[in-house]
Amino acid sequence: MSNLKRKIKNLLNSYRGFHEPDKKLIVVIFTILTFGLISLSSASSVIAYDKFGDPYYYFKHQLFGLALGLIAFAIFSRIDYHIWKEYAFGFLFFSIVLLLLVFIPGLSAHYGKARSWINVFGYSVQPSEFVKLSFLLYLAAWLEARKKDLGEIEKGIGPFIVVLGAIAFLMLKQPDMGTLSIIAITSLIVYFVGGGKIKHILLILLFGVLSFGVMVQFKPYQLNRFKCMIDPSFDAADACYQINQSLIAVGSGGVLGRGLGASRQKYMYLPEVSGDSIFAIIAEETGFVVSVIFIILFLYLFYCGYKIAKNAPDDFGRILAIGISSWIVMQALINIGGIINAMPMTGVPLPLVSYGGSAILAALTACGILVNISRQTKGEKTGRR
């Protein structure tokens, strides 16, 4: 009990020394959230009415996830991020347990070919969304502790490959290549930022590419995604249907768009309009100019995260800030890249925009931690609130 009291006292004392958070970061987060809600309301209206008789069904349900996310954002933005370092191994254990839950009969839920969800009191929860954050928290603490040993195989790159490999194995069993790509890319970025050697990262990338090349030989649908990127007419009626409909939506938006609510592709032509295809509807309704501004918002979010990392008071904060901002922005770019056929479609949601309570809760929790780091950056005036 005395140990707990001491931790609480230290937490309160440190909070008194916090300065104002990065207000530009908060503004850009809430701008994306607001634009995302408006876009979701429009994009999902037709399919929501067709399935549930209510054009605002997805919008209303998103508000519940958003409410939980905003509560988490407020709480985590005020808790000293240093406290999470003490539970680093617990976060790794938590990550593995979360990924194992989807294999438990009666708890797991199947959607299409993927087994990435669980049913909790009638709600679908995607554990891998929370693994993005919990595994990142573990890596940030581990990299700070092993900074001087990252050049050694047995203390640095070896253990890193083992834990990342364990996460990757469980993700592939679901299978969820999209989320795995986000976790893997983010992990390599923070490994580099934490002091890892470039040659080790290149070796991991080479091994990953070779492994993926072998895997797609046994999973033709993964290979088809690359074929569709190269030639969308390869199988326009089946394997390449979604990308073709996405390109029609983006192209028909033109410079200024058809107008909010005026999308034609959302009328049962384009699949997953409330999920990973929502950017296609955004581009169709708002056009090229607004779409570019929307992308710039994500890039600016990364810039804010970079500045926070640069001025973070310690390596743990620096690694964590880069990891969180890289995760959100890389996921956005991968999602948008798939929609415009600049890269294969992966099925990952557009962060802070796509429908999904698990995704928005995890992302806003991470943003809350990023805001807390911004409260403690160096070179700012401190003072009592």
Image (cartoon, rainbow, N blue to C red):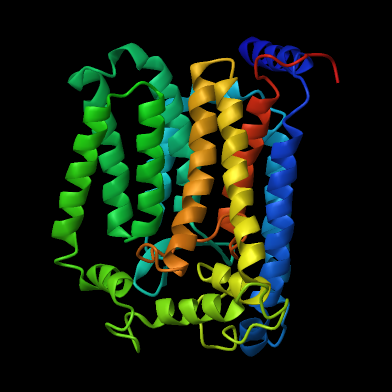
What number of labels is visible? 0
Q: Find the residue positioned furthest to the front.
A: 255
**Based on the displayed image, in which of its 4 quarters is residue 348 positioned?**
bottom left
Pinpoint residue 360: horizontal percent, then vertical percent.
61, 54
In the displayed structure, 380 sits above or below 99; it is: above
| Residue 173 horizontal side relative to residue 285, left or right | left
Q: Quadrant of residue 9?
A: top right
344 relative to 68, above or below: below
Residue 288 at x, y = what percent? 61, 68
Q: Is residue 8 above or below residue 209?
A: above
Quadrant where the C terminus sits is top right
Q: Position of residue 384 (x, y in %)?
A: 84, 15
Residue 107: in sight, yes or no? no
User: Residue 89 vs residue 121: left or right?
Assistant: left
Whether residue 99 is visible to the viewer of this picture, yes or no, is yes
Q: Quadrant of the N terminus?
A: top right
Query: Closest to the observer: 9 or 60?
Result: 60
Q: Residue sitting at 73 percent across and 40 percent down? A: 26
Specify whether 116 is left or right of 265. Answer: left
Does residue 264 lie above or below 291 as drawn?
Answer: below
Return the residue found at the far right.
385
Tell me residue 6's x, y (percent).
67, 10
At 47% across and 82% down in the image, what residue appears?
245
